[in-house]
Amino acid sequence: MGVMALQQLSGINTLMYYGAAILIMVGFDSSLSVELSALLAFGQAVGIMISNPLFDKYGRRALMLPSTFVAALNLVLIGACFLDINRFKWGAVVGVFGYLVAFGMGLSSGPWIVNSEIYPLEVRGVGNAAAVTTNWAFNFIISMSFLSLCNAIGKPLTFFGLAAIAFAGYVWLRVALPETKGLALEEIQALFEGTPKGFMPVASSEGDAEGGGGGEGGDEGDQEAGPAWGRTRGPGPGAEAGVVTKTGVEGGAPVTTYQHSNAGSLNDTDGAIDDGALLRGPGPE
């Protein structure tokens, strides 16, 4: 939800909704302002069309981070031009166009892509609903407050404030945003559970978890509490490979087993899963 809030707090819909009004503030007449605002909006469309096929090639972070940073720089440029708008009105137009293109290159589509991937299946519907609600709530707040802020603190400070939020968002994304390109849903979930990089949870059945990993024959040895074990059977795409698990408890606590993906993602078709690379860690309380 944070990336949704950042998307709106960086000021995109102030420029989309009030594009013509901003150009009138810059000094253009009404008819030219409407024509220029349509052209400027096309800049965002160009950014989106260029970036959409690049998210899976270069990753979410590789596009969202520079998009946010460059958008913030253009907000600074717009604010600086408003300090002496009579001299730099075309500089403000360049700043608005640069902002929209930069925003379209990552911060426009990126938050929607990330939010479609990061939620566990059991809460995905609720998570996406909360994300959309957050997006529209901050859209309302920033859109309703823009003109009031321009009148109260001035246009330069308003745009400098939006730039400060965007710069802060860039720092936050750099620290907190995980790269989800090419990862299976289980691997993405493991990123938020503190699982070591390159490992993912091995699924276990309810019966295994309750019975301590009893085998087909119900051998007495299999009923004893012990560590959880898992392995992938055979080469090929991990998402289709069969998984054999043996789950128990160790020291009275549930244990989760992780398996290593040599190919970097269990959705990759290159190479087999390493049967021997297993990691045992504490399971859910």
Image (cartoon, helix red, strand yellow):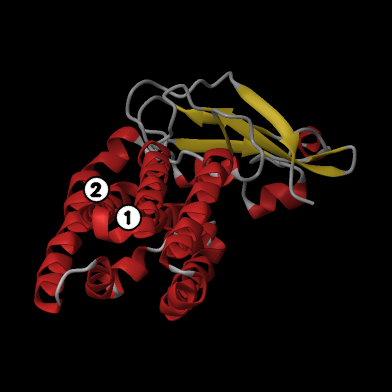
CA neighbours of label 2 inside 10 A, class few (<14), some (14 to 19), many (20+): some
Query: Residue 183 sits in which quadrant?
Result: top left
Would residue 210 appear left or right of 46 to someone viewing this image? right
Left or right placement of residue 40 versus residue 208 in this view: left
In front of the other: 269 or 142? 142
Of callouts 1 and 2, the N-terminal one: 2
Is residue 118 visible in the rendered image? The answer is no
Question: Residue 84's image quarter?
Answer: bottom left
Q: Reply above or below: 248 against 10.
A: above
Q: Position of residue 180 (x, y in %)?
A: 44, 41
* Residue 201 badge: none
- Mark 2 and mark 1 in contact (Cβ < 8 Å)? yes
Task: From the top left corner, tell me how far across and down residue 1 is, in percent.
Answer: 53, 62
Q: CA distance from mark 1 to mark 2?
A: 7 Å
Instruction: Please report the residue visible at 9 percent of the width from the left and 77 percent of the height from the top.
Output: 31
Up/down of 19 relative to 80, above or below: below
Q: Which residue corresponds to mark 1?
A: 109
**What is the crowding at mark 1: few (fewer than 14 residues within 10 Å), some, or many (at least 20)?**
many
Looking at the image, which is closer to me, 83 or 204? 83
Which amino acid, mark 2? Asn
Viewer-nearest residue: 112 or 236 = 112
How many numbered markers are drawn? 2
In the rendered structure, the answer to whether residue 94 lies left or right of residue 114 reads left
Helix, strand or loop at disc 2? helix
Residue at disc 1, secondary structure: loop
- Amino acid found under the numbered disc labelled 1: Ser
Residue 262 left/right relative to 51: right
Residue at the (46%, 21%) spot, across then down: 262
Q: State the mark number for residue 52.
A: 2
Looking at the picture, how far across and down is residue 163, in whole percent? 46, 53
- Measuring 32% from the left and 55% from the top, which residue is drawn there? 109
